[in-house]
Image: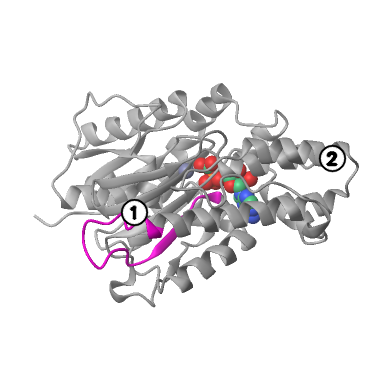
Amino acid sequence: PALGPVLGIESSCDETAAAILAPDGTILAESVFSQTEDHARFGGVVPELAARAHLAHLPGLVAGVLQRAGLTPRDLGGVAATSGPGLIGGLIVGASYGKGMAMAHRLPFVAVNHLEAHALTPRLPGLFPGLPGGGAEFPYLLLLLSGGHCQCVAVEGLGRYRRLGTTLDDAVGEAFDKSAKLLGLPWPGGPHLERLAREGDAARVPLPRPLLGREGCDFSFSGLKTAVAQAVAKGHAHADIAAAFQASVAAVVADRARHALAMAPFDRKPGATALVVSGGVAANTAVREALARVAEAAGLPLIAPPIRLCTDNAVMVAWTGIERLRAGLTDPWNHAPRPRWPL
Ligand code: KG4
Ligand code: ZN
């Protein structure tokens, strides 16, 4: 029988989200509750608070998307819930809720890897009218740039992901947030730092560009953060430091992407069909522009999902559920959430 609409649930960090997608990828309803304000006064995500907030908000979010999609649970074709990697308390809330619903209504359950969900988002049909089929075709090169993750991944096919490089220390969003904190900006600092950088002159502050030109496509940001602390101590204008930091990150990310493409990582010829960037840092204009130049030089389109689908959301979880269900993949009731779950 044809697949019915799929409910997606996301609760791995500090966004509680639910979405329902038709099997062709049409978004029937989506909803995100961001807990940022609850955590801001602590300067970062507090896992216990996050888990409690997921529990408080998830039932209402799920009821809301069902209502707006005009569906009851019985109309669904499956339930997909993020089951790792992430904060264990939140993962248990979302995965248990999803399993409970699936069990009660005799629906298949899909335990979604959050990184796979980010990786498959650009395949969502209809997002990119310029592309044949409206979504990215396998294989493509993914740069996942968020607060928790920083990876170069060769996406060869469903379930076929090759991590080409990752960060040796901080994730890129974490580097933005820590540097922003040193500049006295509120958490999460990425967008604040970007705004401040517009008023600064990057040339006035010499900052390192870690691993630039180095073989492979790993990242390292802790030295850059230390250099920012030193520049603050020396009394450089904060706007100039912000501009220099951002220029350094954009240059490094572009360099790493260039290396990843040159590593010719793909089994199938003619290789990557696109360069894809996702995660919260994909919202950064300087980073996007630097990557656009890399893609252009390689003769590839740069695909960046709309910001709301770059940051944590449940549309990507439901879509991963659809891709997996179509391939006949489901998970058992005893599938345990995994705080660490590499692609
Ligand atoms: O993907 P995301 O929403 O959450 C996860 O970490 O999974 O990413 C959040 C990160 C934060 O570190 C935030 O500061 C950063 O993305 N970010 C930005 C910008 N917008 C968000 N970093 C730089 N420039 C931005 N405009
Ligand atoms: Zn994420």
Mark 1 or mark 2: which is in front? 2
Q: Residues within 10 Å of mark 1 (few under 14, many from 20)?
A: many
The CA span between labels 1 and 2 is: 40 Å
Tell me: 169 left or right of 180.
left
Residue in the foreground of this view, choosing between 248 and 161: 248
Question: Can the viewer see residue 66?
Answer: no
Q: Residue furthest right?
A: 235
Q: Quadrant of the N terminus?
A: bottom left
Q: Using the image, determine if residue 212 lies above or below residue 225.
A: below
According to the picture, the residue beneath numbered tag 2 turns out to be 232
Residue at horizontal 25%, vertical 52%? Answer: 322
Q: Residues within 10 Å of mark 2 (few under 14, many from 20)?
A: some
According to the picture, the residue beneath numbered tag 1 turns out to be 120
Q: Which mark is residue 64?
A: none
Residue at horizontal 59%, vertical 59%? Answer: 287
Tell me: 102 left or right of 154.
left
Write down the region rendered in magenta: 261-280
